[in-house]
Image (cartoon, rainbow, N blue to C red):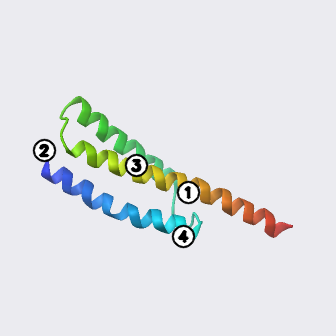
Amino acid sequence: MSILEAIMLICFGAAWPFSIVKSIKSKSTNGKSLLFLVVLILGYIAGIANKLLNNNDIVLYLYILNLVMVSTDAILWIRNKKIENTDNKLNVL
């Protein structure tokens, strides 16, 4: 197991619960980029593939956990964008 890789994933992963809660409460996409979230998702998928192909160890679960959290935030971004678009349509009327 790579302890430094695990520490990196734990540090990155520590921020996502706060981001998810903010997305749920604010119902806004302000300050977030779907493109950025997709790039992170692709990065975590690559990390998972590397672990499965080369060095399957416990760190794999950290990649999966982070992937789930970032994907959740991306889904919330899409939901919030729909909410914003609906609100904008109501304001025009």
Residue at the image position 36 percent from the left and 44 percent from the top = 43
Above or below, 56 relative to 6: above
**Which residue type carries mark 1?**
Trp
**Which residue type carries mark 2?**
Met
Find disc 3 in the rendering and name its residue.
68
| Mark in the foreground, 4 or 1 | 4
In the shown orientation, is residue 8 left or right of residue 74? left
Q: Does dot 4 land on a helix, a strand or a loop?
A: helix
**Which residue type carries mark 3?**
Val
- Outermost residue, right direction? 93
Q: Where's residue 1, x and y in %?
A: 13, 44
Q: Residues within 10 Å of mark 3 (few under 14, many from 20)?
A: some
Q: Where's residue 71, x and y in %?
A: 45, 49
Q: What distance separates the C-alpha of mark 3 from that of mark 2?
A: 21 Å
**Which residue type carries mark 4?**
Lys
Q: What distance separates the C-alpha of mark 4 from that of mark 1?
A: 12 Å
Residue at the image position 68 percent from the left and 63 percent from the top = 84
Residues at circles 1 and 2 in contact by the CB criterion of under 8 Å: no
Find disc 2 in the rendering and name its residue.
1
Above or below, 93 relative to 12: below
Find disc 1 in the rendering and name its residue.
77
Res 56 quadrant in image: top left
- Outermost residue, top direction? 53
Residue at the image position 13 percent from the left and 52 percent from the top = 3
Find disc 4 in the rendering and name its residue.
25
